[in-house]
Structure formats: structure tokens, C-alpha cells
Image (tube, rainbow, N blue to C red):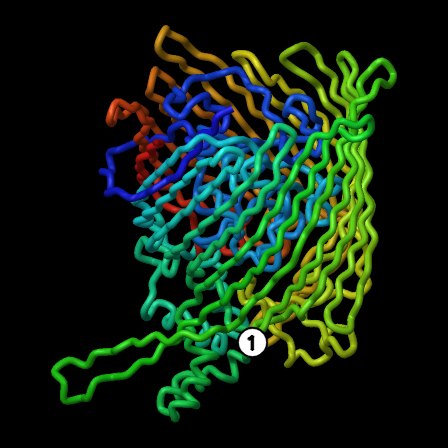
Amino acid sequence: MKTFFTARILGAGTLGAGALVACTFTSAVAQQAESLGEIETPHIDHLEEVHVISSPLNQTQQDTALAITMLKDEALRNAASGSLGETLSQQVGIHSASFGAGVGQPVVRGQTGNRVAVLQNGIAELDAATASPDHANSVEPLIAKRIEVIRGPATLLYGNGAIGGVVNVVDNRIPEQTLENAVALEARYNSVNDLNSQVIVIENNLGALNFHLDASRRRAGELTIPVAAESEALHALHEDDEHDEHEEEEGLEEGHEEDHADEHLDSSSGVLANSSLKDWSANIGASWVLDAGFVGLSYGKVRKNYGLPLGTHVHAGHDEHDEEEGVEEGVEESAEESAEEEHHEEVEKVRIAMQTERWEFKTQWDLSNNLIQQLEASASYTEYKHQELEYFVHEEHEDEHEEHEEEHVELEVETGTEYRRSGSQLKLIARQQPATLLNGELTGAWGVQLANATMQAEGEEAFIPHTKLRSNAVFVVQQLTQENWIFETGLRAESLQLKPDACDEQNNTFSASGSVVRKLNNNSNLTAAYSVSQRAPASEERYSNIDITTCQLKADPETWVAHGATAQYELMATGLENETAHNMEIRWRKHTGDIRAEFTLYRSNVNNYVYLARTGEEFEGLPIAQYEQADAYFQGWEAEVTLPLAEWPASHWDITLFTDGVQARLQSGDNLPRIPPLRIGGQLNWHSDNWAARLRATHVAKQDNLAAFETPSPSYVLVDANMDYHFHINVANKEYEAAVFLKANNLLNEEIRHHTSYVKDVAPGAGRGILMGLRASF
């Protein structure tokens, strides 16, 4: 099998506002391509048998009860974006938790953060994304060969952090098959934020030795938004505050802060201030491939620098009321005193500079003994660091004798907080030889998973102590396949130790699952699944603002550190128990044929659900929130169907209809926060020879099922369109593949406020934008 892959190099000029369509052409990363010279034309095919990498049994998507979303080839190229959440956000059951243009964490069935595991090639990413909503995932979707999402609990396969789902980003940095010599490039430009990005992939071989190299680069300016950054709901709250009993004090404070925020950077003029970004990534890998298996090693590095939109990061650890006058007086103080004062009061903007380095090792070998069919081992070592850079303003007035008094603004930068995380992981899987049982075939896999990591935060906003983590787990999955039935069961036991300095916590978790797939015919099946999943509380839930000398909450509020991204004091809870989720799911799937469809109903009852609840109290002008536990439930549906409309010899029309919704509440009846609202929509698809076009409309309902202290999110209709054309280039009697594409996003220029986002009321989604680009493979 020859390898096709893609590298993208993006850059172009702005398109006119009349352009309504954009394009996305078939991925050059398609590993199924038969030769480097052929073009994969955009037509509708029956679903091919693709093995699910995220399953240890190497099942096809049709033969598993797991709710799996798979993005690859043309669909992945259409959806690919700078953030993982945005790339996946148009898939049923999946949303994005944005924090400006630089962050988009995936939300699966209403759950995110430390409940959704993000993997790179089947092994967890050791970054700080789960610690705070303003931390970006360190994976790079632009170079992915495919992205697999398990919608729903996957603790049996991936442990504690997967109780809500798994996102597995798969690339080809360690080649598992013999490669053909090839180079692929892509370039694109987006008018909504003046984005230019480039990607290149190079693959080659020297006999059994295979090489892979990829690199990507992105640069983007401020994001264009269709409305003022502050939502109407938040503006109304500000107006109400003017009439409360603290009107004079709070009005002065808020007035100063708003005036200062708008003094140099402004988000009310059609752009989201401080939303620019730049990043790059590079990976190199090699493998030795033989008939019986392969062994390979890779090294990768990612760097990101992105801004946090104005008003989304509250400076922590100071008394705004007492220091209000000190800001203005600081200008007249000595240089040292002024710098110190401004460090607390004159923060103009905050940016995050992130870098991660990752080594990966993987080997897989087929065996010929009677017990084990195949052995697989994968390991990684990661070093992650990010700095929260605070930019300060120094204002100086010209002498009065000048004709015009001008204000000069000088920005200085300091590192407010630095996060570091490093660790290693090892996963071993033994796949057993098939055996006959009950007139069927029994297959299975046994595994061991080990992890060792450290996490530390240093600086004025470090509210989580230096913590060591150690995890040891064993698991087994068995599948019995009969004529029209597939039965699957699995067990996992895991020991997790968290140790912040002298405070030591150890939890043992257990997960079990059982499912059945009934093949109704060659094209469809019906599945039912039940599982019990456990999650041990995460370090931020256990240790936020802990006194490490007593292993209890800091007694003196003056020593508390606020979480700048969420603008509140977050306090640990003692005696937290394991979360235990009882999950039920039924699904009907028609996976091949002209009509393809999938309908899913699910419910998860969670005992001892850990959540962050506002206490109703404030300290130094910021609300206080404390982690608590209570029983909760998540329930919802997902539906998607593709119907043929018309077909001519050279063209094909079809339509995809979709909807999803989730309800999440405590058993007391209170709503959980940041739960996505109902979505319903459709996509019209047209394919003709080397052309393809798509028009997609999604209605997102108003979210007014609110948790305490939440604001409602308005409804909107998101309309996108794209078109692509692909062709051959003949150079020196050799044909090469190329494609041009256009894509128009948010054609109606709607106000989009993702309810899943912490900062939806000060950082709306992008306005109307035109993306265009070019791909080529050599």
C-alpha cells in the first residue's frame, strides 16, 4: 500500500465579500491512495472498512459498539483548523470551548477538561490544557492523518481522564508501513484574521528504513467579530450593578477598569483585541518496517504564542478597592515602586507562550505462536512549558511647551506564571490468537499502562502546588463474534497516586463494560452498551489553594490566589471520593449504501460528580467558588442521516441532516454550567468530476437552561459554504496532484457566543470570513 500525504502551505490574498463558497479538497494524507500520481476525485463512496486505531482489537467502525467519530481524508481537510475543538466542532455530539482565537478545547457530550482525554497516536498529551480553560491543547490538527473521537466513556481503554470521551490525533510521524517518496504542500489564507499558514510533509524510504518529516507555521492578526465584544447580557448586568448598594465604590472601580482597558486596546470596533496568534510545529520520525512488523522513533516540537482577549484574565492576588488610587499615584512614584504597582494594576494584555517537546517510540510485531497473535508497545516522554506573559503600560506625557500633548505608551513584559509538566508513559498490548467459542470467534487484548508525571506552577497566580502523579493500570477486552452478533466485554483496574509535596493521595479506580452489536443486514446494525466508569478527582479539584504544611485549605484568605482565567477564587475540597458513572447507550447505524444514517440515545448517571460551585461570597472583589460533590446525570441524543437527491453521469447531489442535544443536571435539579444547546442543521453536497461544493446551515438554539451565575446565550444560524477544484500538473513528463479551494465561514455574519466557553460574554466567535488555499503533492 502506497502512502499519500499532505503538507500544507498557506498564504494568499483577501477575497471579495461577494464570494460565497470555499473549498476543501481531498486530503493528500490519504494512506489508502494507490499511487502518488493519482487524483482522488471528490465523489461519494460507500463507507470503506477502516480499522479504528483507538480500539485495541483493531475493529472496523461497523463492528464496534463504541460511538466513534472519525475524520480523515477530505472530511478532515475540510474541517482542519488551528485548534482541536474548532476542527471537531461540526461533528455531532462535539463542540468547542473557545478562549479567544488561540484556544479551542474539545467538548464531548457536554464534558471537557479533565474528563476528555486528548491523545497523540494513542498516548495522552502531557500538557496543561485540563488545568485551565485558557490553556491550548498542544496537539496540531493541521498535520493529522486522521482524528478519532470516542463519544462517551472510555476509561476502560484510557483511564481516569476519559470518563467523558477520547480525542485521538493520529499522524504518520512513526511510519507503520513502507512509504513511497513524496512531498506535499499546502498554503492558505483567511480574511477573518489575516491568517497565513503553511504545512509541508516529506516522506521517503531507503529499503526497509522509512523517514517522515513535517512542519507547520501559522500567523494571524486580530480576529474580526460582527458585534462588540461584550454581550448584551453582560452589559445589562453592568447596568444593574450601578443601582446596587455599592454603586459608588463599584462604579468607580469598574469605570476605571473599563476606561483603562479601552485606552489602548479596544474590542468594540469590530475586532477582538489581543486575539492574534503565531505558532509552528515540526516532527521527524523513522521506522524499520518488515513483513512481520515495525519499530520506530520520533521527535516533535510545538510552539504557540497567543493572546487572551481583553477582559478574560483578571489579575490575581490583590485588593482592587484598596489599591485603586495607587495606580494613578504609581506614575509619580520612583521607578521601582511604579513598576511594582503597575505589576498589579497596569496589566494591558496577557499572552501565553507555550512550547512542548515529545519523544515517541512504537513497535508492533506479529507472532506465530498459539497464544499471542500480536504484540504492541508504545511509549512517550514529554516536556511541556508555558508562560503567561503580562504586558504593562508606562505612560509619559510630553512637556507642556510642545504644540500638542501626546501620550506615549511603552509595553514591558514580565512572566506572571509559568507552568511546567513532564512525564513518561508506556503502554503494552498483547492481542490473543482467535479461538472458537460457542460457535463463534473469540478475540481479545490484554494490556498494561504506566504513567509517571510532574506538574508545577510558579508565579503570582500559581494556585496549584507542585504535584507528582503515578498511575499503574491493567485492562482486558474480549470480543465474541457470531454470525449476526458481536458481544464485547472489558475490565480495567487502575491505581493512581497524587503527591503534592508532603500531601499524599492514592485512589484505586475500576471500570467495566459490556456491549452487543446485532447485525440487521450487511448495511446496518443495532447496538446497546452499558458500562461503569470511575474517575479519581484531579489535582486542581483536590489541591487548589492548599496549605501544603497542613494539607488543608489555606486558612487566611489573604494568602489565596485567584484563577485569572475564570476570574474567581477556586478552593479545594477535602475528602473527595471517586466519581462513578453508570452509562447506557443504544444506537442504530446504517453504515453503507446510498442512504447512511446513525441515531444514538445515551444517559450517564454520575455518583459523586465533582463540580465547582460559587458560594455567593466575594473576596477582594472576586467571587469565591469551591469544589463540591453531588450526584448528576447527562443525557442526550445524536442523529445524522445522508440522503441521495439526484445523480447524473458526471455529478451527484446529496443532503446530510443532523441534530444533537444534551441535558446535564445535578440530581437536585440544578443545571450544570457551560452545557451546549440544541443544534439542528443540514448540508447540501454536490460532486462533479474534479469539482465539489458544499453548503451547510446550522441552527444553534438559545441556551437558557442556566447554572447559577450564568448568563443566557442567544441563538444563531451558522451558514458556511465551500468549493474546491483539483487537477493534475504535468512537469517533465510527470503528473502531480494539485487542488485549489475556497471556503466562506459565517456567511450571515451572525453573533456567535459558544455557551461552552468561559469567556463567551467578552469574546464572541469570528465574523464573516473567506478562506482560500492551494495544495500540491509531488
Toward the right, the furthest residue is: 438
Q: Quadrant of residue 528?
A: top right
Q: Residue 24 at what x, y percent from top left?
A: 38, 31
Is residue 443 in view? yes
Q: Which residue is mark 1?
A: 460
Using the image, determine if residue 482 lies above or below residue 586.
Answer: above
Which residue is at 31% across, 80% downward?
Answer: 395
Q: Looking at numbered disc 1 in the image, what kind of residue is underneath it? A: Glu
* Residue furthest out toward the bottom: 334
Q: Residue at x 75, y 27 (%)?
A: 368
The correct choice, above or below, for 418 with respect to 145 in the image is below
Residue 473 locus on image (x, y percent): 79, 48
**Position of residue 117 measured from the top left corner of the image (x, y, whole percent):** 64, 46
Q: Secondary structure at mark 1?
A: loop
Please state if 214 lies on the left or on the right of 706 as rendered. Answer: left
Q: Is residue 597 toward the left or the right of residue 336 in the image?
A: right
Nearest to the observer: residue 437 or residue 243: 437
The answer to whether one can see residue 760 in this image is: no
Q: Considering depth in this image, is 703 or 66 the residue closer to the camera? A: 66
Nearer-the-camera pick, 121 or 505: 121
Quarter of the image for the C terminus: give it: top left
Crowd tier of the residue under label 1, counting other residues whose Cα lies within 10 Å: few below 14, some 14–19, many 20 or above: some
Q: Position of residue 9 (x, y in %)?
A: 34, 42
* Residue at 71% across, 64% down: 468
Residue 267 quadrant: bottom left
Q: Is residue 78 left or right of residue 627?
A: left
Note whether 336 is above or below 70 in the view shown: below
Q: Residue furthest top?
A: 649
